[in-house]
Image (spheres, rainbow, N blue to C red):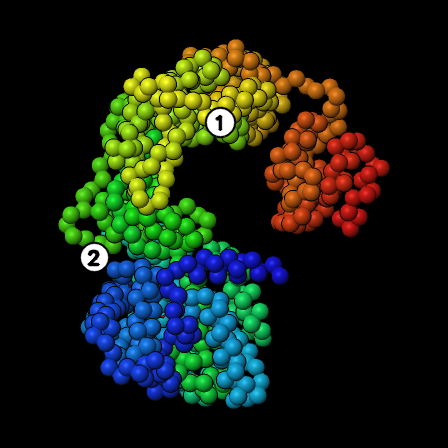
Amino acid sequence: MAGSCGIEGNVRRWAERPRIRQDGRVTSQPDSAQTPAPSQAQDSPVPPAPERERHGELVELIQKYRAAYYNDDDPLISDAEFDVLYSELERLEGLHPELASNDSPTQVVGGDVSVAFAAVEHLARMYSLEDVFSLEELTAWLAKTEASVAKLHGKSPQWLTELKIDGLAVNLLYRDGVLVRAATRGDGTTGEDITHNVATIKDIPQRLHGSGFPAEVEIRGEVFIASADFIALNESMVAAGKAPFANPRNSAAGSLRQKDPAETAKRPLSMYVHGIGAREGLSTLSQSETYELLKSWGMPTSPYFKVLSSFEEVLDFIAHFGEHRHDLIHEIDGIVVKVDDFGTQRALGHTSRVPRWSVAYKYPPEEVNTKLLDIRVNVGRTGRVTPYGVMTPVKVAGSTVEMATLHNQEVVKAKGVLIGDTVVLRKAGDVIPEIVGPVVALRTGEEREFVMPTHCPSCGTALAPAKEGDIDIRCPNAQSCPVQLTERVAHLAGRGGFDIEALGYEAAAALTTGPGPNPADGAGAITPAGPGPLRSEADVFSIGELDLSGVVVWREIRANGAGTGRFHQVPYFYTKATPKKSSVPTKTTEKLFEELEKAKAQPLWRVLVALSIRHVGPTASRALATAFGSMKGIREASQETLAGVDGVGAIIAEALIEWFSVDWHRDIVTAWDAAGVRMTDDTDESTPRTLAGLTIVVTGTLPNFSRDEAKEAIITRGGKASGSVSKNTSYVVAGENAGTKLDKAESLGLTVLDEDGFVKLLAHGPAPKFENDAHEEDA
Ligand SMILES: NC(=O)c1ccc[n+]([C@@H]2O[C@H](COP(=O)([O-])OP(=O)(O)OC[C@H]3O[C@@H](n4cnc5c(N)ncnc54)[C@H](O)[C@@H]3O)[C@@H](O)[C@H]2O)c1
Ligand SMILES: [Zn+2]
């Protein structure tokens, strides 16, 4: 089953949350009237004072947070933090049911009616949903519900499975097919009248299409702002000098609950139907059937709901949308499972807060709140100065995050974050974490604005944009700015360059920036304190000439977190101040020499990558190496000739000419050449150029070739290894799990080869004798 690993992954990650019920209960709403109290509770009719006190605290907190969330559309804490508190309250009331008075947050639908709107009574009550946070809890809920349904009807229910859209609920009252009123959920009984605002939402018909409508029907749905529209909306808010919304949910709620409908009209609101309230004269028997009917009346229904029969299918649905959560037009925070049949829904009923026929499985949170402790700047390989936030470490989407880039000073301004703010931190799947914005309501007045430095924190040179109008500012001291040098050295040693494993980032820093502050002093941070022994990457292959007997590239030193059991790898460079007698070359140092020696034999394209020429990555480097065969050839080529090379083009040609015009750049090449680095690709006559003129795309996993090896095999035989399939592709080599590229090849009628076919192609070129072996069905 393809989805199974996704499910397991979810369980593992989610299970780490503090929100694990310790009493193992599955029901989240203690419904004292229906649910027998847990036995231990009967032994203690009056809860002990500490529990009563904690209960009071929790109620107060939750009420405060609910008010900020529902009434002000401006939450003070993240949903994940809220859920932890709410869970604790449920657990406490589960152990001491006497605490669950009628007005406890566990007994009422969260939400209120603001005085800004007229109050309206819903014809049928609106409920919240019972939440579960693990697949075990969900399966237990399904099993419990299935058993109840079996007792009622002697058969298993059908599960209507839907996306849990992160927006806000509206209740639309249609009389004889005409929208007469729209309301928010409010406390479930009474909502806020937002009829005029809803009238501006294009998705929602003022008059239902067709005929045969019931006299009165309440259609419920979720109003949301699509993720792409949210980004555009926030940009326009900031441009207009207003505070941006923390997330699409708040932006939808805030936009819909405007006092002026003209303001709502400007907001890109959409809606999907997810329920039905009072329904006089409606003859459908199930919720899914009703959705089809509503769709025919012109109501927007989600394209994603499914009616499923087995638990397994429900779990697959969850795994699928767990993976594709960010491929949807709107945000989701979970999956809702409902018993589809109306009769069964009625029979199962509801508690004071939630229906018993429905449950919401929540995905692991992608947004958390944390403290922005500082904003620092980082100097990159090209001298670009990038501010980044340093935060109290916090767990989000499966990893602990304590830093996030803020891109440039304009972004810091646009986000409106101050040092010391509580901020919303978002990490969507594998995407890098992002500071969304501040929680303004929590400011104490102690926060301070970030000021972009005017001088390079590494070398002290005045910072400036590369050209007028650039937002990014740079350190222009490219040659000897220690941090830029560190970045270039780490890059040249990287996987795409010389591939020197022992020269990782820390080792590069130790060689280029010299001794940092002594971690034993408690500073902890590795701030460069001045140039190290390696003053230029030109000297990287003569590193042996430096007094390496005094250099320890790696040392393990206990950082200031002593006693916490946490060790920091700290690069350390011995200087005169440190007695030489204590230094013995480490294993890593020996390995460094071995690898440096081996690196000299790397092919020309890797040498080109290692030079850190703008825009010249592996693809352009391979093209250049293939076209010219030597560094000399590239260096002497005119801009036009360079630009004419397939895969190079005008921008790269210009960058190359510019790069070679700088003295110290040419010195690098000269020094490497002198050190014995290979500067020509000797065309290996033993490899026949069987693939000259052919463009080949490799996709999926081949049993005996890595992606790089397959590429190399194609290029050394004179072929072009391309990443995208087009009608100019000569062959597509498809391994296991080949995806859309294979589909495209098939739709274009291209010849698709498996590994055997590929090996034959490499050996013989496109001879008819093996083309016949290729997938016949593709012809
Ligand atoms: N951050 C905070 O301070 C804060 C405060 C209060 C509540 N919250 C968050 O709000 C949530 C609790 O709010 P809630 O009581 O509105 O419950 P809920 O949002 O968990 O679930 C109920 C709501 O889900 C919505 N929904 C979306 N798709 C649906 C579908 N397909 N079918 C049915 N309903 C669907 C409906 O609007 C419904 O009212 C929690 O996630 C909580 O973390 C956060
Ligand atoms: Zn600098």
Q: Position of residue 340 (x, y in %)?
A: 51, 79
Closer to us: 96 or 217: 96
* Residue sticking out furthest to the front: 581
Pinpoint residue 681: horizontal percent, then vertical percent.
Answer: 63, 19
Residue 96, horizontal then vertical, whole percent: 30, 79
Q: Is residue 744 left or right of residue 25?
A: right
Nearer the observer: mark 1 or 2; the answer is: 1
Crowd class of label 1 (few under 14; some 14 to 19; many from 20; radius 10 Å):
few
Q: Quadrant of ligand 1?
A: bottom left
Q: In the drawing, what numbered circle is on residue 441?
A: 2
Of the numbered discs in the image, which one, if any, rests on residue 128? none
Residue at screen point 68% across, 31% down: 714
Residue 708 image position (x, y, % from top left): 62, 34
Name the residue at 51% across, 64% down.
318
Quarter where residue 527 is shown: top left
Q: Residue furthest right?
A: 769
Look at the picture and state if 443 lies above or below 636: below
Measure the alpha-carbon separation of dots 1 and 2. 54 Å
Left or right for 347, reference 115:
right
Residue denoted by label 1? 587
Q: Going from the N terminus, do you reach mark 1 or mark 2 first?
A: 2
Q: Nearer the viewer, residue 521 or 267?
A: 521
Q: How many marks?
A: 2
Residue 604, above or below 714: above
Q: Amino acid at mark 1?
A: Lys
For image coordinates 61% across by 59% down, the residue present is: 2
| Rendered-image quadrant of the N terminus | bottom right
- Asked whether the residues under the numbered discs 1 and 2 touch, taking CB atoms below 8 Å apart as contact, a structural biologist would say no
Tell me the SS state at disc 2: helix
Camera sees residue 521: yes
Helix, strand or loop status at disc 1 = helix
At label 2, the amino acid type is: Ala
